[in-house]
Image (cartoon, rainbow, N blue to C red):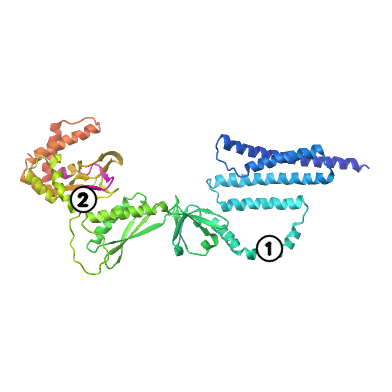
Amino acid sequence: MVSDPFSGIFSLVDFSYTLISRIAILSVALLFFLSVHCLNVFFNKGLSPSKVKATIRIALLGFVLLLLDTQVKPAPPYGNILGNALSLIVMACTANLLAYLVVDIYFYFRMGRQVPSYQRDLTTSLIFIFFAMAALRLIFRIDLASILTTTTVLTAVVAFAMQATLANFVSGFYIQNDDNLSRNTWVSLVEHDITGEIVNVGFRYTTLRTLDNHKVMLPNNYIMQNIVRVLGTRGGGEKSAVHLKVGLGYDLPPEKAIDMMGRILSQERYIVKAPGPVVIVNDFLDSSIEYDLKYYLDNYSSNRVTRGSVLKKIWYAVTREGYSIPFPHREIIAKSAQEPFPEEKRTVLAALQRTEILQSLGEEEIRRLSEQVRVRVFGTGEVVVRQNDEGGSLFIVRRGSLDVHIDDAPVGTLREGDIFGEMSLLTGEKRKATVTAASEVRLVEISKEDIDPVIRAKPDLLEKLSAILARREESNIEKRKSAGVQRTGAVKDAFLEKLKAFFGFSAG
């Protein structure tokens, strides 16, 4: 009789503790997911909306059932059902809260806002399996050992029927934990000629994005059982080499070809500087010498653009030097190199006649000069002259446009009729700017060897050329708004002395 009051007290304490814990769990879950919902709606924080609205509804339902359980006091059979339902709701809210904290917050910020679906689904599934087992044991009083014993045969049958799915699941686990196959890594499947960037690893398949922006889904087990070539990771420290095979004619000396293609690779935008590109002689073929161009890319996605740009510039460079890209022949044909772009020769004379620094020459002298000069063609992005390089030629723009940079800063554009390089031609000075083709350009090049006979035949031309150079220099100074401009006479005399020294005339 004495123990009855204490039993009632202990039951009341146990009931109060259970009630408080349920209220606390439901309140925490409700307030947390309401906060997430408000941050997304009103402040656009971009948090994951997964489980947010569903958990809010479940928590509100739990409060309704809690009110019924404490106020209405239903009959024992219905009270037990109501209590079990309330316990399930509390466990569901706890599971959703834990899954959101681990997957959508911890993993989300730990992995740079990119949580693989494989890791997301696996972690969420493990959390819910744990709470489901806890519910069976604590709420429904079911012995889990008996369930596992009675389902052993069924598990074996299911495992045999789903062996391919299980193989993909296990393979996905290994892929997910292999640094060589992490997200943003470019891989190539040798046997099926598939190249792409890993964008996701799921339970059943791995998704690749190809260079054509197509998505290819490969079973995880297939990746683990086949040869996969890793091509590097976007923004990663390791860079994979790209080999480009190019065949050039036997009439083009290998040293000249290697130097020409090496310059093209060193100027390409997406090719990294360290380790630098390499060009080697790879093989002697039937109609060409095969060269292996080896270079490294910071991002393999630029491979196709880089390959096309390099091949285009090689064609322009080879053709500009008077050679051609070889092709197979069925008979031996003797062929001598001919002047490239012969149709441009017809317009050279008119271009020389309109050039300011050549207007002091007579008609016969300009005609002879037009027979000596060369027409050079550059493709988009090629460097015509580089700042501080040695130079001894002048260029007249016949077609296209070029960008001018001084110390890597853009300073202007050259178009049809403009000239550049006159200081290097007439005084031997180093190039003062870098000039790059903004489109396909056709240029008339006048070298010192071309104009030297004309100068020696008429030495008085030096006076006129120095005056023209002085005017052009002062014009450039005014454009740059530079202070301390020299007088025309002083500039002219300075250029006259440089001209005489460069062409070997005695001073005075």
Please give the residue where the numbered disc 1 appears in the rendered image: 155
Is 24 on the left-hand or right-hand side of 390? Answer: right
Please give the residue where the numbered disc 2 appears in the rendered image: 376
Magenta stretch: includes residue 95: no
> Residue 262 at what x, y percent from top left?
30, 55
Is 412 on the left-hand or right-hand side of 49? Answer: left
> Residue 3 at what x, y percent from top left?
90, 43
For label 1, the SS is: helix
Above or below residue 5? Residue 135 is below
- Tell me the number on the disc at residue 296: none
Q: In which quarter of the image is residue 285?
A: bottom left
Which residues, given as a range, are shown in magenta?
425-442
Residue drawn at x 22%, y 31% is 478
Residue drawn at x 31%, y 50% is 267
Q: Quadrant of residue 475?
A: top left
For label 2, the SS is: strand
* Residue type marked 1: Thr
Is 244 on the left-hand or right-hand side of 402? Answer: right
Query: 76 or 177: which is nearer to us?
Result: 76
Outermost residue to the right: 1
Whichever of labels 2 and 1 marks the residue nearer the N terminus, that label is 1
Task: Report the quarter where the C terminus lies.
Answer: top left
Q: In which quarter of the image is residue 336?
A: bottom left
Query: 351 or 278: which is nearer to us?
Result: 351
Query: 250 or 178: which is nearer to us?
Result: 250
Residue drawn at x 34%, y 54% is 308
Classed neighbour count for the residue bearing mark 1: other residues with Cα under 10 Å, few (<14), some (14–19), many (≥20): few
